[in-house]
Image (spheres, rainbow, N blue to C red):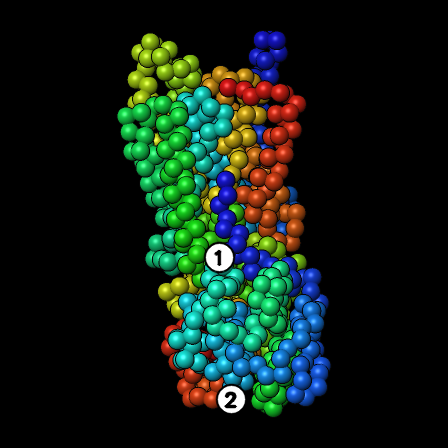
Amino acid sequence: MRLLNLSGISRLLRAAVLALIIPAVPAGLAGQAGGPIKVVDSLGRTVVLPAKVERIISLEPEITRIIVALGAGERLVGIDFFLRRHDRLFPLVFPPSERLPVVSNQGQDLNYEEAIRLRPDIIFSSPSEFRMTDSIERKMKLPVVALASMGKFRDLLAEIETLGRIIGREERAAELVSFFGRRMGSLRETGPVRAAGAGPSAYLSFWGSLLRTPVSYEPVEAAGGKNLASGLLPSYLGTAGATVSLEQILLWDPEVILIQGNYPPAERQVTVEGILRDPRLASVRAVRDGRVHYTFGFWYWWDPALVLVETAYLVRLFHPGSFPDFDLTREGDAIFKEFYGAEGLFSALCRVLDCHEWKPE
Amino acid sequence: MSGNRNKRSTAAFVLAAVLPVVLLVLSLTIGVYRIPPKAVFTTVVGAVFPGGASGGPSPYADILFRIRLPRLLLALFAGAALAVSGASLQAIFKNPLVFEFSLGISYGAAFGAALSLVFLGRKVPAQAAAFVFAIVAVLAVLFIAGKAAAQVVTILLSGVIVSALFQALLSLVEFFANPYALQSLIFWLMGSLAEAEWKDLGVTLPVIGVGVTVLILLRWRMNVLSLGDDEARALGVNVKREKIVVIVLAALTTAAATAVTGVISWVGLIVPHLVRMAVGADNRKVIPLSAAYGACLLIVADDIARSVASFEIPIGILTSVVGIPFFIVLLKKSGKIWL
């Protein structure tokens, strides 16, 4: 009677639960220069780390991306399966990742023998893997640090700072945090965002289903919009996501519908065209007004550059006509260059996701 | 005793004729979008007689006719399909534990949906793939059973083998799945009526309707088959052919339902047992009553699934979580299995 491979989705389910039960724990860090340092991770565990971290295994895609943004990609010796098999962006921002060993897979959190062979100084894991984190530490006799933004800007910035200290890239971390803060601040201060007050109400269709929606999505609020599912209890699937009914969507009558677009077009289960043609949604304002769009959405939490681009994109999307010169690709390339140091990265991602077609009206 | 049972049978048939319709009408008023009963009435009347009463505001008509009605009709037909299939299979195999899972239908459908959701994108809809592989699973069972397809042990063993194969293939697809596609698959596997659409029902309902009707018409023969193979042969019945006809019909109806609803377990096991507890093991009564009460069970389960929380509870979870303890209590109280 068992139809579900629970081990395969364990991390997603635990992430959903943890989003509820774990208070946002900004990772802390203490210690003396040159000596071992102590970190309090997102699970509230105190971990003692060596002063020098040269060989890193990261099982959490968000952490891996930040390590690359901090300029320490060459220290990665093993990565999570998601980045190799499913992430369209990571191979673009860090091409050497193609040669890195994958140390996990869908049903197995860590390939221990491979991990031992790689002789890491530290392993990063996700806080949603709360049992696995302790288990790895016991078996590997290595420091294991669990960190993630859990979909909160504040925790994303704290994560960047903590990782900067752990790998000795405090200055670069401070640069990124400052850049992120400045760009986000300027977006929030943009005339229409401030003037709009209560911006458009938005329904977000995430995780390949019309009916699954995040109960918290900060880029929407930062862009002056209102996530209609905000405040709902997360249900059983996804990361902080709830499953709602079609009637609920009609009841909310959103002004804008956003579809998670982090998939290549052929892999999208929910499409703009499909929603616009769906007779059940014909009376919804967003459908009547043609305001159904793709956005990026979570992709094992965030890429710090991509979520910034997404917020800028949503600002323009929510305030049509206010930014006639907005160019998503140009904006995205500039932000990605700041994080990853190369030209045209966002353009390359857009070619995969077809986001050139997402231009706000 | 016999008089009591006859009275109970009559009451069960009267209730079976009325209850599905009453539940369907009542359920039209249930949902997160509050529509007053009077508005439901005027909207329905307005739709039936366009020149008469007011059709009500447009969202009401959209919700009633584009969202609730297809969903309720799917619940009605799928509930009937699952329950009748279970009752029919239990009758011909003389085994109270046989239902769609036993013939590999559910795992076949699950594998088909997995292939579609994980690898094929929108090219092949999950419903179509689920239906095709549910049928493939049953054909595989019949092929493996070969000439001994009329024997209970052989066909059940073949079902176990085919189920195990599709379960392994399903796990393989899950292993390679993008975690987000995996979520879609898990959602499908839990069963839901939330996305019922007329375009899906246009194919599904006729298949279920024909399958259920023919199975009900065959209820007399199922009585003969349930006497045992030798007795049935002595009465001039072609046992193998009749059993295969019932199996194929049960598979078709279940596959048609599962393809649209996802995996909804236990309906095919619980409903026929409850019916037998009420009216005895006569398939002339059990089969049609199972259809009616299966439909009722799924309508009520769906009402609960869509109204008790701010999010939808997958109906497959609900039928299992509520149905199994209920079934255990009934078995414990009665102390026997009806067949």
Position of A93 compared to A242: left or right? left
Does the image show residue B300? yes
Q: Position of residue A82 (x, y in %)?
A: 46, 67
Whether residue B254 is situated above or below residue B237 in the rendered picture:
below
Disc 1 chain ID: A
Q: Amino acid at mark 1?
A: Gly
**Callout 2: few (<14), some (14-19), or many (20+) C-alpha neighbours within 10 Å?**
some
* Residue drawn at point x = 39 percent, y = 17 percent: B225
Q: Position of residue A282 (x, y in %)?
A: 49, 59
* Residue drawn at point x = 40 percent, y = 15 percent: B228
Q: Position of residue A256 (x, y in %)?
A: 54, 69
Question: Which residue is the site of mark 1?
Answer: A107
State if disc 1 and disc 2 touch (CB < 8 Å). Answer: no
Disc 2 chain ID: A
* Residue drawn at point x = 29 percent, y = 33 percent: B143
In the picture, which quadrant includes the N terminus of chain B?
Answer: top right
Residue A141 placement: quadrant: bottom right
Does the image show residue A262? no
In this rendering, do the residues under marks 2 and 1 share a single chain?
Answer: yes
Position of B231 compared to A261: left or right? left
Residue A271 placement: quadrant: bottom left
Q: Amino acid at mark 2?
A: Glu
Q: Name the secondary structure under disc 2.
A: helix
Marks 2 and 1, how far apart in space? 36 Å
Q: Name the secondary structure under disc 1.
A: loop
Of callouts 2 and 1, which one flags the residue occurring earlier in the amino acid sequence?
1
Question: Which residue is the site of mark 2?
Answer: A338
Q: Which mark is residue A212?
A: none
Which of pointers 2 and 1 indicates the residue nearer the eye?
A: 1
Out of B123 and A287, give the one closest to the viewer. Answer: B123
**Mark count:** 2
Q: Position of residue A147 (x, y in %)?
A: 61, 72
